[in-house]
Image (tube, rainbow, N blue to C red):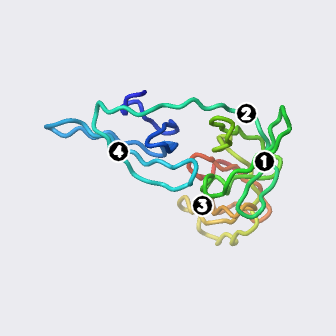
Amino acid sequence: MIDVNELRKGVTFEQDGNLYKVVDYAHNKPGRGAATIRIKARDLRKGTNLEMTFNSGNRVQDIRLDYHNAQFLYADGDLYYFMDNQSYEQYPVKADTLGDQTQYLKPNMDVKLMFFESEALDVELPTSVDLLVTKAEPAVRGDTATGVTKKVLTETGLEVQVPSFVNQGDTIRVDTRNGNYVTRV
């Protein structure tokens, strides 16, 4: 059991038979009374997002996750297939479970696959990924006085706000934690 004050972004816990991963965390201490902890969590089996509120001092069941180095192979409808790099076994993970992480996955990409009792649950992506820009509007001449940005579409379907000098056919590096443009590669 862990105290709810120890819940932070990325922590996984079990409550009422469901497995949750903390997406966002906020600690609120009013002038009077007990502190409250509000979290946004994602159900790892169903893929649904929900908000939870705990009183300070409550406890939740922590779980032990196993991580395996894996490689993303392909997507087939609602399932994304990953191959364990050591055993070469393939594990399907539902698109609902992965959520927005599917927009960063490219074939042959190395990831960490999270397991709970031999059940593949979630994927831990690298901090950044290189994506090819497939659609970009041309930059307007004279828009250089300030940091002008535009939206581009990448090969995985992700829309990213980038500087105006990025063109179609360029490869950009995107931060997988927040979806922001990092640099042109």
Q: Nearer the viewer, mark 3 or mark 4?
A: 4
Distance from Cα at disc 3 to Cα at disc 4? 30 Å
Taking 159 as reference, is 87 left or right?
right
Considering only order in the chain, which callout, 1 or 4, is on the residue closer to the N terminus? 4
Which residue has dot 2 on it?
A: 68
Q: Can you give x and y, in whole percent of width and height, for residue 14 in the image?
A: 48, 38
Image height of 54 relative to 97, above or below: above
**Dividing the picture into quarters, in which one does residue 5 lie?**
top left
Which residue has dot 4 on it?
A: 38
Residue 161: numbered disc: 3
Considering only order in the chain, which callout, 1 or 3, is on the residue closer to the N terminus? 1
Which residue has dot 1 on it?
A: 72
- The residue at the far front in this view is 17
**Residue type at mark 4?**
Arg
**Residue type at mark 2?**
His
**Residue type at mark 3?**
Gln
Considering only order in the chain, which callout, 4 or 2, is on the residue closer to the N terminus? 4
Distance from Cα at disc 2 to Cα at disc 4? 31 Å
